[in-house]
Image (tube, rainbow, N blue to C red):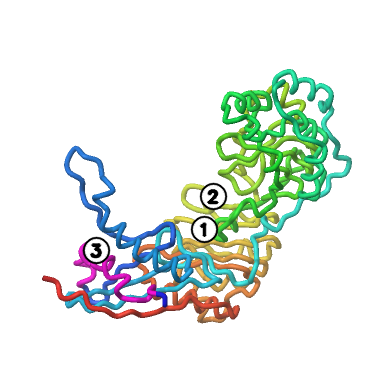
Amino acid sequence: MSTLHDFATWEPLLRLLRAAHTATLAVPGGNVAGSIGQGSWSVPVQQRRPQPGRALLVSDMQAEFDAIERVQNALAAADVAHIAFTVEIPPNGQVVLHLFDPSPAADPGIGNAHPGALLLVEGAMPEPWRRLPETVPGARPAPSVDLALLERTLRERIPEAIGATEAEIAAVDARLGVALPEEIKVLYRVTRARWADWDDDYEAAQRVFDVVGFELGSLDDVSIADRSCRPFRWEHAAMEAAVTGPDAAVQDLVGSPGWIVIGDTGGGDQVAVDLTPGPCGHIGQIVVLDHERSVGAELFAESLTDLVQDPERDWYSGRGQGGLPQVAWVNHRSVTSIEAAAHPELEVLSLGVWDGEPFSLAPVIGLPRLRTLSGYPGTLADPLEIARLTALEFLELPPEDWRVLLDADAVPRSLSAAAIRAYGNHDTRAIVALANEILALWDRPPILETIVNGDLGPLS
């Protein structure tokens, strides 16, 4: 039997919360909220102050760790990823604990007990994650490709390397479902880059790094960087745009069936050979997938031959997406009007912190590509104007604006996902109830609530 909903499982944590929030909980209706996952937690437990001149030690937080572990063990036993809670503990100690079990249609919140994005359509992905590479007519390998020069250079610089057999290379082609480019076959014929071949010799591995300019992965680890290599949260991914310009060497994609990963920069950034280049790129160019970005890749070299001639080059260009008409951030520090943001190519509109009059959405009504709207509290003059944005697939609003739409039965049915932007002291119970109203419009599984009663005894 699962103990996740047992008072005894939560009692040690509840005692810590009462000690940390006595005044808040003593007020009628006062409550404390948090969330716990199997590998992390966000719980407002008061930290002990270390002795002067001493750093905070694990032992100073042992009571918190033990209390959290008790709940995490129950999560693991119940095969539940996370749980959110709100608790009321009046001075008489009669606990009312509200537990919110996860729904497959609601992501966990970030750093609080409120739900994250609500998935209204099963399996739906934001537009950039749906984008596939376009065919570029006439795309060819770079003029710098020279297989003989490449092999000669590699063998001269790493003569002790053990190369892959033709059968091993053919097996990778079969596994990936795509043939490795000839330059990459030459590379692995010289060295298959297996750690076992280096016999724990870090200097041997470093020599390969120095020759090619990145940490070459084993032939056994060669993979394809499709869109699954970049997981997403809807509330973040919906704010992205994938835009490939006519002069781009690399297509602006989340992932591509033509990005074949062959290594790493040493900093968590994947190095890939690109078989689906941009309009001004070359088949077989070397690109880097920046781990700090969700969309796009940086051109590293036009060919592996070119890279081996100058392996110390820097792949990072520093280019961003600033100034793109597809994404507009309207706030007191950036674009200061919706009229200035309105553009036929506009896909994403974010209304941020604003101290002026609320905005009308009239300037963007009718824009054919507007798919994301995110509104900060108090930024919309008339939330019902949202019903006229017929192409929205993601909508993020504060609770009061959602209330207006729900009461008027005006929630856009074009949505694939939604989010509630709740700041401050919004009661988690009210936010969960609002989320369930939205989920119900799409007949999606609700966030289930379990109420657990218990007694901690009166405050002494």
Disc nearest the viewer among 3 and 2: 3
Can you identify the residue that label 3 sits on? 16
Front one among 102 and 158: 158
The kind of residue on which mark 1 rests is Leu
- x 39%, y 63%: residue: 72
Seen in the image, is 73 located left or right of residue 460? right
Pick out the residue farthest to the top: 156
Q: Is residue 2 above or below residue 141?
A: below
Q: Position of residue 69 (x, y in %)?
A: 35, 61
- Picture layout, residue 401 above or below residue 178: below
Report the residue marked by disc 2.
Answer: 335
Q: Are marks 3 and 1 in contact (CB under 8 Å)?
A: no
Q: Residues within 10 Å of mark 3 (few under 14, many from 20)?
A: some
Amino acid of disc 3: Leu
Quarter where residue 363 is shown? bottom right
* Magenta extent: 3-26
Nearer the observer: mark 3 or 1; the answer is: 3
Q: Is residue 378 visible?
A: no
- Using a 10 Å C-alpha cutoff, classify the residue at mark 2 as few (fewer than 14 neighbours), some (14 to 19) or many (20 or more): some
Q: Earlier in the sequence, mark 2 or mark 1?
A: 2
**Which residue in the structure is indicated by mark 1?**
351
- The quadrant in which the C terminus is found is bottom left
For the residue labelled by badge 3, is the local secondary structure a helix, a strand or a loop?
A: helix
